[in-house]
Amino acid sequence: MSSSRAELRRFVVVRARGCCEYCLSQARYSTHSFAIEHIVPKHRGGKTEANNLALSCQGCNNHKHTKVKARDPLTRKLTPLFHPRRQK
Ligand SMILES: [Zn+2]
């Protein structure tokens, strides 16, 4: 990892305060390392820049994978997934 990538990773971890930006679990209590994930996946044009990166636990990262939308279990409508930079 180049130093700029390491700095970007550090920035994302500090901004997230060490918590998964989807489920808010804390990295320090996890037995698995957290990932820096692309909110908009690279194959959909997402860039490797701070506004498109989120700290994610393995569970959230595995569920989200490359999706940006999923079926709402109640309405069955295709719904955008939570976006940590645009939603609270
Ligand atoms: Zn999570």
Image: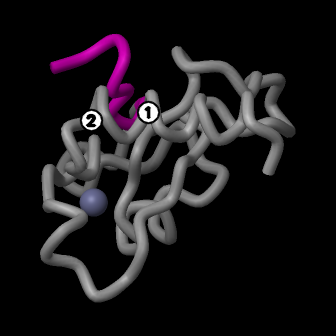
Taking the magenta stretch, the answer to whether it contains residue 38 is no
Amino acid type at image mark 2? Ala
Nearer the observer, 1 or 58: 1
For residue 16, which numbered disc appears in the image? 2
Amino acid type at image mark 1? Val
Give the magenta part as a residue range. 80-88
* 14 to 35, vertically: above or below: above
Question: Which corner quadrant of the image does residue 58 belong to?
Answer: bottom left
Q: Are marks 1 and 2 in contact (CB under 8 Å)?
A: yes
Toward the bottom, the furthest residue is 31
Tell me where residue 7 appears, x and y as whole percent: 59, 31
- Residue drawn at (43%, 33%) of the image: 12
Q: Counting other residues with Cα less than 10 Å from the Cα at mark 2, is it few (<14), some (14-19), or many (20 or more)?
A: some
Q: Label 1: which residue?
A: 12
* 22 to 28, vertically: above or below: above
Nearer the observer, 25 or 8: 8
